Image (cartoon, rainbow, N blue to C red):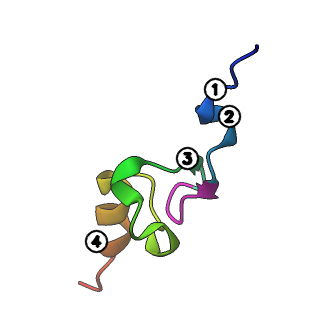
């Protein structure tokens, strides 16, 4: 019997800030549909664009 790695079948998205693909994580299980950024760094970079 051959085992299939679960990481190959995880859903992916494209980050709204850096445009890199990222995969589903357990901590995003409840709100995967709302996840837009691959990391806290990208999330803060997108919200840091304020007129000054």
Could you tell me how far apart the alpha carbons at marks 1 and 4 are, in whole angstroms? 38 Å
What span is colored magenta in the figure?
Answer: 12-18
Q: Which residue is mark 1?
A: 5
Mark 3 lies on a secondary structure that is strand
For the point 59% across and 34% down, which residue is it?
7
Could you tell me how far apart the alpha carbons at marks 3 and 4 are, in whole angstroms? 24 Å
Q: Nearer the viewer, mark 1 or mark 4?
A: 1
- Judge whether 47 appears above or below 7 on screen: below
For the point 53% across and 54% down, which residue is it?
18
Q: Residue furthest bottom?
A: 51
Left or right position of 30 against 16:
left
Q: Nearer the viewer, mark 2 or mark 1?
A: 1
Q: Residue 48 shows which numbered tag?
A: 4
**Pointer 2 local density, CA inside 10 Å: few below 14, some 14–19, many at least 20:** few
Q: Which residue is mark 3?
A: 23
Could you tell me how far apart the alpha carbons at marks 2 and 1 are, in whole angstroms? 6 Å
């Amino acid at each position: 019997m051959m085992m299939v790695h679960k990481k190959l079948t995880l859903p992916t998205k494209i980050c709204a800030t850096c445009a890199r693909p990222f995969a589903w994580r357990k901590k995003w299980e409840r709100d995967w549909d709302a996840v837009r950024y691959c990391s806290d760094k990208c999330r803060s970079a997108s919200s840091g664009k304020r007129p000054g």
